[in-house]
Image (tube, helix red, strand yellow):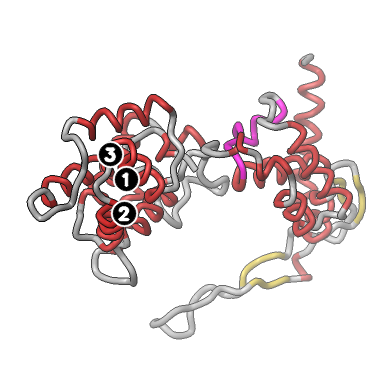
Amino acid sequence: MALSELQRMAHLFRRAGFGAARAFTGWTLAPTLPLQPYGRFDWAFEYRPDLHDDSSKTFLGETGPWNGEDIINIIVKQPATARFIARHLYNFFIADEPPVPAWPSVPPRDPEAIESLANAYMTSRYDIRSVLRTLFLSDFFCSEKTYLAKVKSPTELVIGTVRLTMDVPFPQLGVREIALECRYMGQDLLNPPSVEGWHTGKEWIDTGCLVERVNFAAQQIADVSLPGVQLIMDRLQAASPLSPECCVDMCLDLVGPLSVRQATRAALIDHVSAGGELCFTPEAAQVTSQRVSELLQLIVSSREYQFN
């Protein structure tokens, strides 16, 4: 792009930003000092008409005596807004997308899906319910290609594992420590790094965070006293004796159900096969429980468990 074109675009963005700032003059908060020094104090929005700039403003090519709501209405009807929302919804519900700010330099994962969601947004006159209806009834939402296409966020990984093991059936001591696990994995709950929020996808995975993710999941599932783990043991015991292949398939089904690559399944079977058939007779119950515990730890440490 030529330098003159970049300069022109920069000028337009500065002008648009200045117009938006003038449109939001007078928007403020009510006095933020609490009347009472104790207890919760809610802030309240306040509009000060005496501080508002009523003169004409230009924003994204439209000129008028805009106020804050007018600026929002102008933004809402932009085609770029439709694509931005479409990619965020696709990223949240279906599959990880390249970071939206990189658009259009980075092509979307599924251009046709993004386009259909953007069209639904525009044709419905910016109705998010219509966009979600289009998304949930679409073929790409139900496609097998979208299975295991999203890296679990730390919250999804932690909460999913805790629900699997039934470690916290109701609020109790220790919940704070579990919440802190999300922070150790890079997602400090209610404290995003910026107004943009957290980046998703493979940015959740690095050499440090991956160790935290694997260690947490393996440590949780290793505790055979937890109700969720005990339920898995009971299901396996009811079906015993089990061949290594059947045991691996049942565990994958009970943990997920979780589909894994052939190489992963083969490695799991190879590990279990070292002890032969699995049987929960009184003589073998302790050894079998240990073998199953090790198998479950390997499953939650697998690559596939890191994905939705």
Q: Point out the tag, 2 or 3, that comes first from the N-terminus.
A: 2
Q: Name the residue at the bottom extreme.
A: 36
Secondary structure beneath label 1: helix
Residue on which disc 3 sits: 243
Residue on which disc 2 sits: 180
Q: Nearer the viewer, residue 241 or 129?
A: 241
Toward which corner of the image does residue 146 lie, by quadrant?
top right
Secondary structure beneath label 2: helix
- What segment is highlighted magenta in the picture? 94-104
Residue depicted at x 42% and y 48%: 256
Under mark 3, the amino acid is Ser
Q: Are marks 2 and 1 in contact (CB under 8 Å)?
A: yes
Vertical side of 228 occupied by 270: above or below: above
- 3D distance between C-alphas at marks 3 and 1: 38 Å
Q: Are marks 2 and 3 in contact (CB under 8 Å)?
A: no
Toward which corner of the image does residue 206 lie, by quadrant?
top left
Q: Nearer the viewer, residue 70 or 22?
A: 70
Q: Position of residue 16 (x, y in %)?
A: 79, 42
Residue depicted at x 11% and y 50%: 286
Q: Point out the tag, 3 or 1, that comes first from the N-terminus.
A: 1
Vertical side of 225 occupied by 283: above or below: above
Under mark 2, the amino acid is Leu
Residue 273 appearing in the image: yes
**Mostly what secondary structure, the magenta segment?**
loop
Tell me the quarter of the image containing the N terminus.
top right
